[in-house]
Amino acid sequence: MTIERFLKDIRQIIKAENRILTEIADRSSYGYDASFGYHLPDLVIQPTAAEEVAAVMKLANQYFIPVYPRGQGTSLSGGPLPVKGGVVLDLSQWNDKLEIDKEDMVAIVSPGVITAKIDAAAREIGFMYPPDPSSSHVSTIGGNLAENAGGPRGLKYGVTKDYVLGLEVVTPEGEIIRTGGRTVKNVTGYDLTKLIVGSEGTLGIITEATLRLVPKPPASQTAMALFEDMVDSGRAISKVLTAGIVPSKMELMDQLSIQAVEAYEPRGLPTDVGALLLIELDGHPVSIAEEMTKVKELCKSVGARTVQVAENEKEAAEFWQARKLVSPAIVRVKPTKISEDATVPRSKIPEMFQRLKEIRETYQIDLVVFGHAGDGNLHPNIIADARDHEEMERVEKAVADIFTAAVELGGTLSGEHGIGTMKAPFMEMELGKAGLDMMKRIKTSWDPNNILNPGKIFPEPGQRLVLRHD
């Protein structure tokens, strides 16, 4: 068989047998990610050098075997799933390099380094690495780069692509290239760095990254604002941002989120409010004190019931802990969670809230809304039971309507989770036929044999969103 011949050749490249996984018990754990679906790979390889990855890719092209790069498998869109069998490249063990250069204000990292460790290392010398996806304590930087991950701080600081200065990449045909460098300014030729970041492992395998660091702000302050109606919280967001105040974080929890958290781990939050906003300001202590006064006034001007400012870091941490508890809290109601990240322009946040309320009522689903409301990156989460096929059919229709609402309001299918397999059927709706075709041409030029992470981003003929598994 082809895979057996491929495996024989691979063993000439990777001598450590423990980095080649062939047993079904080992391979099975690579058939999942944090989304939906199960696809068993034929082989799992754990490379620790760019030369090994390059050799694997050259062989894969020779044998026409698909290859799927993978970090820790925290993807919510199906990004690393081996949908066509073949080989999973597990890069999560490749974590030997985490260098901080204080003078150049950069970090040089291997793809398997846990993202939170980069920020922690930077903070030891007075800097920070801003991108902070909720999975940063377990996700790898390679996966974050592939998906162009965001997080709560994206409102003020941007997302992963805004901090990538240079990459070492293995192309689908097995060549090792470098893009960008260590300089803040670099306009030599096409920006291949930005093209690779967010390409979801379809154009290249990132084997090293040079990341920009920024000075750590000297102080921060957090407020919790309570609103009778979720739409009012959307108006508060617009008021604050148009007043020239740019919070470092601006997070939303709707009533169902609050109720779930209080049932899961009571924190004294009022369960009769429509929504709450958590607003963090950072910078010089005097400046943020003035801005926080203005934030309170603006929130109250659109009907906030109360605005409570944390008196110290401990109380601020208590506020944020409530937000962190939403995900584990809501799955206690029902076991299946569909987490979306449709994103709209800031001016359309109130309207998107209204559309979500209508979708909840139309399909009679348990739709919980929380997320990074300050940049329009909402996280409509639907909690259901995958064993109830009738309910899951309604959920599939609701998800389609959420995507449609976001696009109709001038937004996008994804703010940070990526497209993967789950959102591929909706790509043409946002990009148009010509726009999607242009992306396909780029993919074909980089990967003529369609070896690298096939089945992602681009929809197969007749493909649709399916969350049910018969």
Image: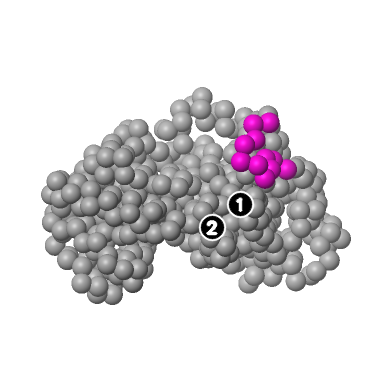
In the structure shown, which secondary structural element does the residue marked by tag 1 occupy? loop
Question: Which residue sits at x=17%, y=65%?
Answer: 271
The residue at the far top in this view is 434
Q: Is residue 217 left or right of residue 121?
A: left
In the structure shown, which secondary structural element does the residue marked by tag 2 occupy? strand
Question: Which residue sits at x=26%, y=44%?
Answer: 240
**Dominant SS in magenta:** loop
Task: Look at label 2 and name its amino acid.
Answer: Phe
Q: Position of residue 434 (x, y in %)?
A: 51, 24
Picture colour scheme: one colour
How far, Cα to Cα, is label 2 from label 1? Answer: 8 Å
Answer yes or no: is residue 37 visible.
Answer: no
Q: Quadrant of the C terminus?
A: bottom left
Q: Are marks 2 and 1 in contact (CB under 8 Å)?
A: yes
Q: Is residue 22 left or right of residue 262?
A: right
Q: Position of residue 420 (x, y in %)?
A: 52, 47
Q: Nearer the viewer, residue 226 or 369?
A: 226
Which portion, as a residue range, is magenta? Answer: 178-188
Q: Nearer the viewer, residue 311 or 143?
A: 311
Question: Which residue sits at x=69%, y=43%?
Answer: 181
Question: Which residue sits at x=53%, y=48%?
Answer: 160
Q: Which mark is residue 105?
A: 1
List the residue tagged with mark 2.
127
Answer yes or no: is residue 121 visible.
Answer: yes
